[in-house]
Image (cartoon, helix red, strand yellow):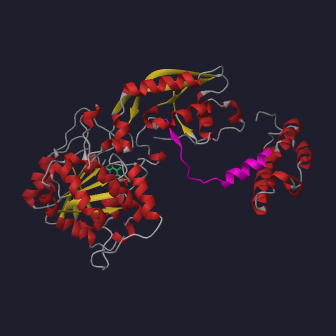
Amino acid sequence: MTAPATPPAEADGLYRKLPQLGEAIRRPEFTSFPHTMVVAAARSVLAGIRQRIAKGEHTEASLETEIAHLPRSILAALHEGERYSLRPVINATGVVLHTNLGRAPLSEAAIRNIAQVAGGYCNLELDLASGERSRRDEHVERLILRVAALRSGQDADAFARSHGALVVNNCAAATYLALNSLAEGGEVIISRGELVEIGGGFRIPDILRKSGCILREVGTTNRTRVADYEAALSPNTRLILRVHPSNFSMEGFTERPALSALVALSRQYAVPLFEDQGTGCLVDLADYGVPHQASLIESIRGGPDLIAASGDKLMGGPQCGVLLGRRELIDKVLSNPLLRAFRVDKLTYAALEATLFEYLAEELQRIPVVRMLREDPEVLFARSRALADSVAGATLQAELMAARSVIGGGTTPGASLPSFAVALHHSSLDAKALAVVLRRLDPPVISRIREDRVLLDLRTVPAHMDGLLASLLKQPLESFAAAAPEPGDEVQT
Ligand SMILES: *Cc1c(COP(=O)(O)O)cnc(C)c1O
């Protein structure tokens, strides 16, 4: 609102124009809502108006308009109050693993399996053959080991004999639990170049300290050699830690030992090597035009003693952390009483099991994350062209432009995939206001802004939603701009 400031004396008069609560709620359109909800909605709308009067944002005329709209505002507040807070959105950012948007969408099979398991009882901790109590972590262990062996080209039976796996809430929990189980009170050697912050305040040095380990930093920020690790080994060393620096890349005068060199060192001195791999990537990204990326496959082949990875990054499954490693190390983690605090529920097992089955069946296109990475730019071009043609009108300009989609989620720093975007320009809304309006649609559309254009990248929009997206954009968008944009709510990737 751009009304001139109201002197205090006149503000008194404005307050008196406001209807009483009882009067405001006596309307037939509210009778279908519970009385307490109507009262709460009306109170909050009236309080908002009072606040605007106090700030001097109302003239007599603007207040009258707002009072005339009062029933509509209360009704809108009522509908808002009925809506779930967590809602599906259309991710048109092109960021495949968008941390703010829930990372990996699940496969059809995972969703079906969640629904089946959730709707009734299941054998979460029951051995169906013996009728005895069993452990929940056994449900996916063999499957994880089979998929790990299959994807890394190793003999599945031999791999399963010497390895174990377990699932916890996320990769951060997996890393913490592994450090605490294997190295509490002892020293953990880590390169200064890998003392990273993964995001959301997850800092490797803090996790090390919280897990009760003594940090032994070696090397420098840009260069660490095997000899640096070797020189730091002591009778107190419990673990060598290697962390995938997943959200940044260093260029120039840098050096980092190959995984194989650290594996050799750890075997020579019989000190276990633990790798926080993070990405959980079980495909070869080079096949999709993204070369030189660390993957879980590569780590499994490299043979560190223990690996931690996220389930909802490039693996494309539910939020969880997978620990995979030598049998005796996994057994140590399993015997940590803290495991209980990090264990996952039946829905996670249901989704993870179904996701991993797609890898076993080699049906990778059924995993949405993999499908989006593979999406043919020509298909994206055609879909974007069709969307631009169908939404362009008198007030909305829509042009096709070349763009790059980001994989995101802290997996592949600096890497991107060739894509296309529909660039929107509105005759009365600037790019920022237009992006706000798009988030007010139902379902909300999340976009990104470049050079005063709002970009829509269809790589992350399921093709069957193109029609819905077009119809959302064909509405008179300026009518959603009524209220001022909330400050500081820009989405981060
Ligand atoms: C993403 C990531 C984490 C954190 O994983 P969450 O599953 O989000 O807890 C930890 N380490 C690395 C290397 C990562 O890439």
The N terminus lies in quadrant: top right
Left or right for 195, reference 271: right
Foreground: 216 or 269?
269
Q: How many marks?
A: 0
Q: Position of residue 465 (x, y in %)?
A: 51, 37
Instruction: Answer with the quarter of the image where residue 351 lies.
Output: bottom left
Q: Using the rendered image of the protein, determine whether residue 419 is visible from the camera's viewpoint.
A: no
Q: Position of residue 95 (x, y in %)?
A: 43, 38
Foreground: 59 or 288?
288
Foreground: 136 or 254?
136
The C terminus lies in quadrant: top left
Q: Position of residue 163 (x, y in %)?
A: 17, 62
Q: Image point 51% across, 29% down: which residue?
A: 455
Q: Image point 19% across, 50% down: which residue?
A: 150
Q: Which residues are magenta?
A: 72-92
Q: Using the rendered image of the protein, determine whether residue 405 is visible from the camera's viewpoint.
A: yes
Please tell me whether residue 78 belongs to the stretch shown in magenta.
Answer: yes
Left or right for 319, reference 23: left
Q: Position of residue 280 (x, y in %)?
A: 29, 49
As drawn, which residue projects farthest toward the left? Answer: 268
Please tell me whether residue 14 belongs to the stretch shown in magenta.
Answer: no
Foreground: 346 or 425?
346
Q: Image point 83% across, 39% down: which residue?
A: 58
